[in-house]
Image (cartoon, helix red, strand yellow):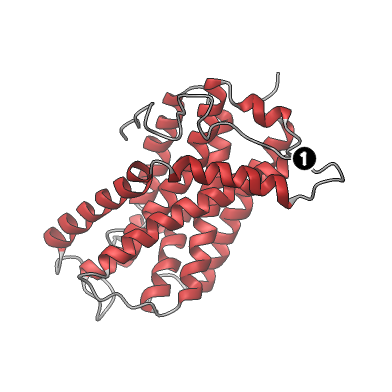
Amino acid sequence: MPRENFHENPDFPGSPDSPGQITVRIDPAGSSLLTPTLTLFHKEVLRFARVWLQTIAAPLVTTMLYLLVFGHALGGKVPVHPGISYTTFIVPGLMMMSVLQNAFANSSSSLIQSKVTGNIIFVLLSPLQPTEIFLAMTAASIVRGAAVGTAILALALLYLHIPLAHPIWILAFTVLGAGGMGALGIVAGLWAEKFDQIAGFQNFLIMPLTFLAGVFYSVQSLPAFWRHLSMINPFLYVIDGFRYGFFSAATIPVWGSLTVASAFFLFSGGLAWWLLGRGYKLRP
């Protein structure tokens, strides 16, 4: 995965006036959990929104290229659900793949750049609690992932008929998938000490798992060994459940997918919250 430009990416702010700074307003009478959480959330959203061409438009273009190339090359050759064209079938998978990858990138890059540039001190010296940091960063990751997914869907709808059978399921798996990946990004950002380690985490773990989660094919078309092996990939359940929200058809029962997606969110979220509470690799 190519490294993003240091001076143009919100993950690498170049001046003290950039959104890498955190402004915390303290209510003398006592502040609620919501106020500092919203302050950090606002900072995290501004961080990627100010360079939307790189954080929103670039994944959109990449996904459209996947759609055009794979849709043209494999259309009619790969068995999918009855009554659904291959090009239409892969749209939800590509959407969720981008949602997951961008949600992870948002929180992981925010933390690693703050640690490397020293901006993390503004978080540590502020009255922000671990729960507030976790909620703000995870919510911002969900927003970025959802923004990318929505842009992909809007563009795909211009030339494809894509049903929206169950919007509630679409929303549920978007929140669980993006939230789980945002929390996993916090874990990676805390663990990593340099940008290369984040890139390795993305290239050797996140990218293969998302690509091999039924984005471009139905797992039912795989030989038995590979089909059973695919079942240990949690992203398969997130993508399959998300696809059910569009077509009312899924390889795995949707409630089973919801259970695995929820477990993934709770595990990664719990681990991120626990590490933040311990100050893992944040404090000496």
Give the image location of residue 175, x and y in percent.
Answer: 53, 60
> Nearest the camera: 127 or 190?
127
Residue occupying image coordinates x 26% and y 79%: 82
Question: Which element is circle 1 on?
Answer: loop
Q: Quadrant of residue 78?
A: bottom left
Residue occupying image coordinates x 70% and y 44%: 36
For the question of whether residue 231 can be seen, the reply is: no
Residue 4, placed above or below residue 40 = above
Question: Is the C terminus in the top left, top right, bottom left or bottom right quadrant?
Answer: top right
Name the side, left or right, on which 26 lies relative to 221.
right
Determine crowd level at label 1: few under 14, some 14-19, many 20+ residues with C-alpha closer than 10 A. Answer: few
Q: Report the number of discs.
A: 1
The disc labelled 1 sits on which kind of residue? Answer: Ile
Residue 272, placed above or below residue 267 = above
Residue 54, placed above or below residue 240 = above
Residue occupying image coordinates x 26% and y 48%: 62
For the question of whether residue 200 can be seen, the reply is: yes
Question: Is the N terminus in the top left, top right, bottom left or bottom right quadrant?
Answer: top left
Q: Which residue is mark 1?
A: 26
Residue occupying image coordinates x 50% and y 28%: 113
Give the image location of residue 97, x and y in percent.
Answer: 37, 54
> Nearest the camera: 269 or 149?
149
Give the image location of residue 47, x and y in percent.
Answer: 49, 40
Q: Residue furthest top?
A: 284
Name the side, left or right, on which 106 lies relative to 284.
left
Q: Residue furthest right?
A: 29
Give the image location of residue 262, x and y in percent.
Answer: 59, 60
Q: Quadrant of residue 221?
A: bottom left
